[in-house]
Image: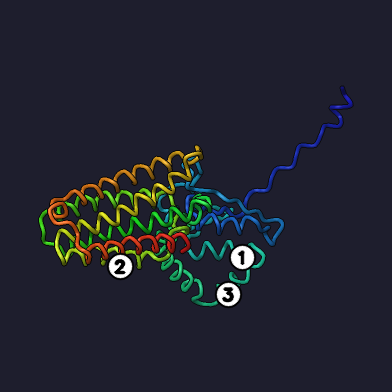
Amino acid sequence: MPELLDHPHPAPAAAPAATLTVLYDGACPLCRREIGVYQSLRPIDTAQTLKFSDISQVDSALPPGAQRSDYLARFHVQRGDGQVLSGAAAFVALWATLPGWRYLALLARFPGATSVLEMIYRGFLRIRPQMQGIAKAFEAPRVPKDLAGDLRSDQAGETGAVWIYLGLLAVSTDVGVRAFAQRHLATEQSHLNQINAVLPWPQRSRLLPGWRVAGFATGALPALFGPRAVYATIGAVETFVDQHYQHQIDKLQNRPEHAKLLSLLRECQQDECEHRDEALANDALQSHPPGWLLRAWCKVVGSGSKAAVALARLI
């Protein structure tokens, strides 16, 4: 026992105090990616240490008197002596500690360089929310490839449907047609919103401007010729859409992992069938069945819808 007291085990060496604390917004996907690069590097000076603090976490410590909202709005670092730097000055202080990045810090020593960097940083902050939205979309879980094409065609179709009704409302003065269009426009917009919530932005159709123009024309042209043409056109479009959704529903019948998506598709299909049935049952069509010209137009609309779906699956 005395021998142990004479030769005590040495106490473990204390971890060196951080000489620079990086205060970053971990809820920002842009910040996370950039900080990840910095975290992968070791300081040039081996005696120096870096500490990274995600201040989006409510339990994370802030400098005395600091407001969390202020620190989330701009990039900050805190030196070992407690001094806090913000914006471009904070980046320069961090870059100076890291291999590769220190050359940017050296350039910042030129007169006025840090001021220019600060102006650039403030410009970035103006567009930061938009860039965050894009970054978050790329981080969102992707839809499986075998379903992405179908959902992309759904998104394109619902976009076209919204614009069909916008085209009707822009041209038609018929009270019944306008009430019909306003009622179903709300439903189609709801479908589009739900599909957009499922399909992340990077997987959506790149041809949406074209689908908007095509949809608007499909609604506006028949509106020029009166209610019969309008209801016949809607009937033709929705007849195809019913078949289109049924094809996808059949594919998902035995895939329980996509039960929520299957429920959404069934809901959309039911609404579209109601639109079709209401259009085809309208008195304007019942009393005067379509002639050859209107029937030919409806065939063109159906074929165009089919071609648009095939294209949207790819692009």
* Residue 114 position within the rendered picture, expressed as x and y whole percent measured from the top left: 50, 71
For marks 3 and 2, the one nearer the N-term is 3
Q: Residue at x 53, y 50 (%)?
A: 144
Amino acid at dot 3? Leu
Q: Quadrant of residue 274?
A: top left
Amino acid at dot 2? Val
Q: Residue furthest bottom?
A: 111
Q: Residue at x 45, y 67 (%)?
A: 121
For marks 2 and 1, the one nearer the N-term is 1
* Residue 122 position within the rendered picture, expressed as x and y whole percent measured from the top left: 42, 66
Q: Residues within 10 Å of mark 1 (few under 14, many from 20)?
A: some
Colour theme? rainbow
In this rendering, would 150 be left or right of 271?
Answer: right
The alpha-carbon separation of the residues under discs 3 and 2 comes to: 50 Å
Q: Is residue 196 above or below residue 125?
A: above
The alpha-carbon separation of the residues under discs 2 and 1 comes to: 53 Å
Element type where label 2 sits in the image: helix
Residue under numbered circle 1: 96
Q: Nearer the viewer, mark 3 or mark 2?
A: 2
Amino acid at dot 1? Ala
Q: Residue furthest right?
A: 3
* Residue 22 position within the rendered picture, expressed as x and y whole percent measured from the top left: 55, 54
Tell me the quarter of the image containing the N terminus: top right
Q: Is residue 211 visible?
A: yes
Query: How many numbered markers are drawn?
Result: 3
Residue under numbered circle 3: 107
Residue under numbered circle 2: 213
Cβ atoms at labels 1 and 3 below 8 Å apart: no
Q: Residue at x 43, y 64 (%)?
A: 311
Q: Is residue 260 above or below residue 172?
A: above
User: Camera-side residue: 304 or 267?
Assistant: 304
User: Camera-side residue: 257 or 249?
Assistant: 249
